Image (tube, helix red, strand yellow):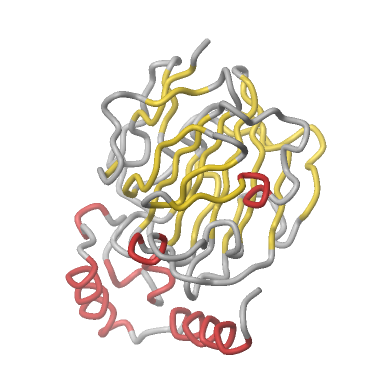
Amino acid sequence: MATPLRMALSHLVGWAADLKLPTPLRSGVFRTYARLAGADLAESRGPLEIYPSLGAFFIRRLVENARTVVEDPQLIASPVDGHFQTICPIDEGSILQAKGHSYPVRELLAGVGEDLELEGGHAWTVYLSPRDYHRIHCPETARLVQAHWVDGARYSVAPKVLSKRRVLSINERVVLRLETEHGPLLLVLVGALNVGRIRVLGVQPGTRSALGSGNPFDRGAELARFEMGSTIVLISPPGGLEPLAETQVGEPILMGAALARWRS
C-alpha cells in the first residue's frame, strides 16, 4: 500500500498539475515541459493556450490523423504510445517485469479473469514516459465487461526501477476485461509515482464489479487515460494472441500500430 508520505506527495503533485495557469504563461510553460520531456507539440490539438493547466496539457488530444489504427483483422492495435518493456509467455503462472524479474500474473489481475486459463498465454508490457500521448484506446472491437480498481503503492514504473524491484503487481491499478469476437483480453492500467488518477470512459472510478452486458468500444476508440505517466500490460489467454517478429523489447510503438496477431 502507498505510505502516507508517498500519498501526500501524490496529492501535492496532483494539486500542482491542476493549478490553473494565467493564459499568457501557458505557451511558455508547456513548451518548456515539451522540450525537457521530448514531447512533439506538432501533434497537439489546438493552440497551447487552450490548456488551463499542466494536467490538462498532459492528457492533450492529438490532431486528426496523427495516428493510424491498423485495419488488418488478424492484427491487434497497440492501445498506447510507449516503449516495449517485455513481450513474454505466461510461464508457471508468472510474467516478466524487466531484466529477468518476474511476478505472479494472478497477483497483477487481482481476481479478474479467474475463470480463464492463462498458462501458455502471452503478455505485452508497454511503458509510457512523460513525452508520450497518455490516452488509452481499445486494441480491438470489444465489450468492456469488467473494471476493477486495485489499491496499492505508487512506485515509479521507469525501466531502471523495474529492473531492481517488483512494482507492477503491487502498484495502484485498474484491471479491465475485454470480450472480443476472438476471445477475452485483459488490460491492466498500472499507476505510477504521483499517478493516482486513472480514468475509464463510462465507468465510475473505484468500481470493482462486472459491467453487465458490457460497454461497447470500436477498435481504436478512446477507452481510458492516465493523468500522468505509467504502464499498461495486455494479457491474452493461450490460443489468443501471438507476438509479431518485428516487435522487440526496448523499441517504441505508437497507438494504433500492430502489436500482435490473432492465432485464429
Query: Image quarter for residue 204?
Result: bottom right
Q: Is residue 226 above or below residue 209?
A: below
Q: Quadrant of residue 177?
A: top right
Above or below: residue 209 compared with residue 139: below
Left or right of 229: which side holds 214? right
Residue at position x 49%, y 60% in the image: 226
- Say which residue appears at 47% left-offset and 83% top-offset: 13
Q: Is residue 260 above or below residue 152?
A: above
Left or right of residue 184: residue 126: left
Residue 44, position in %: x, y?
28, 56
Residue 33, percent across and down? 25, 74
Q: Identify the residue at image location x=54%, y=34%.
A: 90
209 vs 203, nearest the viewer: 209
Please, is residue 149 above or below residue 117 in the view?
below
In the picture, measured across the screen, residue 185 lies left or right of residue 82, that is right
* Residue drawn at the location 27% of the way across and 42% of the way down: 66
